[in-house]
Image: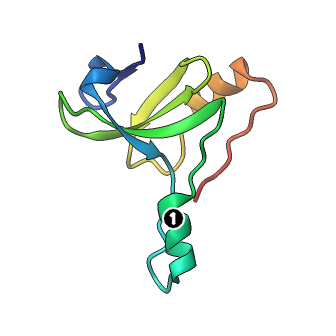
Amino acid sequence: MLILTCPYCSVAADETELSAGGEAHVKRETVGADDAAFEQYLFQRENPKGIHFERWRHAAGCGKWFHAARCTNTLEVFGTYSAQTLEPPKNITDAISAARPGWTWRNFS
């Protein structure tokens, strides 16, 4: 079972109390975007086997959106953080790098 800690209310919630919101750190092109750019934004998302950054909503709790860094293969959670953050906090990227040597943060914006 996947358990994530909400960074706002500090509750460790299992996946039944949360709502998945897809990939985190996806930038929406709004000014001057053509149909192809909007299609890319809507439908073309990462779905890796391994480290992934996702959006989650604490639906049965405070109701706020947050980001989580986890491994989709092992369900190992490296941390959660505010959805208003443009990049993962250094402590999370350091934890991933320690667990997966050679891994580097890929900026999605």
Nearer to us in this view, 87 or 63 = 63
Q: Position of residue 2 (x, y in %)?
A: 42, 18
Residue 66 shown left or right of residue 71 in the figure? left
- From the image, which quarter does the N terminus lie in? top left
Q: Is residue 89 visible?
A: no
Which residue is rendered at x = 58% and y = 59% of the image? 109
Residue 104 shown left or right of residue 40 in the figure? right
Q: Position of residue 49 (x, y in %)?
A: 66, 31
Residue found at the far bottom of this picture: 32
The scheme the figure's colours follow is rainbow
Which residue is rendered at x = 29% and y = 29% of the image? 18
Compared with 36, 65 (above or below) is above
Q: Secondary structure at mark 1?
A: helix
Q: Position of residue 38 (x, y in %)?
A: 49, 73
Which residue is disc 1 drawn over? 41
Which residue is rendered at x = 56% and y = 66% of the image? 40
Which residue is rendered at x = 34% and y = 22% of the image? 15
Compared with 93, 44 (above or below) is below
Q: Residues within 10 Å of mark 1 (few under 14, many from 20)?
A: some
Q: Position of residue 25 (x, y in %)?
A: 51, 51
Nearer to us in this view, 94 or 74 = 74
Q: What is the total number of numbered labels drawn onto the structure image?
A: 1
Quarter residue 97 falls in: top right
Instruction: Name which residue type carries label 1.
Output: Tyr
